[in-house]
Amino acid sequence: MDNKLQELTDKLYREGLSKGKEEGEAILAKAESKATEIIEAAQIKAGEIIKKAEKDARDYQVKVEGDIKMAATQSLQSIKRDIENLMVNGMVGGKATSALSSSGFVKEIITSVARNFNSQESVDLELTLPESLKSELEPFINGELSKALSGGIDAKFSGKIGGGFKIGPKDGSYFIDLTDEAFEALIGEYLRPATRKMLFGD
């Protein structure tokens, strides 16, 4: 009886041990499988993060290179403009201002322009001149010029004009700007392309 009981106990022990071992191996296999899945998922995620980081780095590099290139281009254009302005202003500035500040030269141009306004019909004119030439030009306008024109002429003197003048119909429909500033800008626009080509080959 004791032997049978011992055998039964041994058998139950072996079966329990075997079953426990199988369950343990199954749990271990499942854990290993889950661990493998987690590792693979982590590797995929890590790969995606690395790819995104590499793409972001490339995009940033392209942006930085583009910004540097744009800044360099703008800087070069600015330098070219400064050199161009110095050259053009050197060629035009002093001579234009000197000529348009001469009362004799201004009288000739005013007379010619005013006569052209009055050549077809009588037009009342408005004239703006430099304050610095008032003493020399006012007697000329009120005398000689007024007599030469069929229409009237209203002259104003402004400290904002360094040389030359502005003239147009009194109704303000339009005017001709022959101030030293406008003249320099006009001549400068003609000189700029030639200057740019000479300096930079553009």
Image (spheres, grey):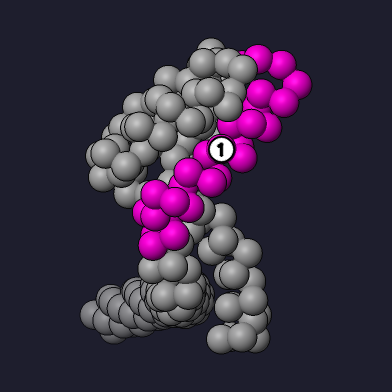
Is 143 left, or right, of 3 in this rendering? right
**Residue 179, image x, y percentages:** 44, 46
Q: Which residue bears the numbered disc 1?
A: 111
x, y percentage for residue 110? 52, 39
Frontmost residue, 150 versus 197: 150
Q: Residue at x 32, y 49 (%)?
A: 162
- In the image, 145: left or right of 9? right
Kindly identify the residue that appears in the image at 39 percent across and 59 percent down. Answer: 97
Nearer to the camera, 170 or 3: 170
Amino acid on which disc 1 is placed: Thr
Highlighted range, magenta: 97-123
Seen at 37% across and 54% down, the residue is 101
Task: Give residue 58's position: percent from left, percent from top.
Answer: 49, 79
Quadrant position of the C terminus in the picture: bottom right
- Residue 134, given in percent of the width and then of the height, sits at 29, 37
Quadrant of res 28: bottom left
Q: In the figure, is residue 29 to the left or right of 132?
A: right
Residue lying at 71% horizontally and 16% vertically, measured from the top left: 121
Q: Answer whether residue 85 is visible to the viewer in this image.
A: no
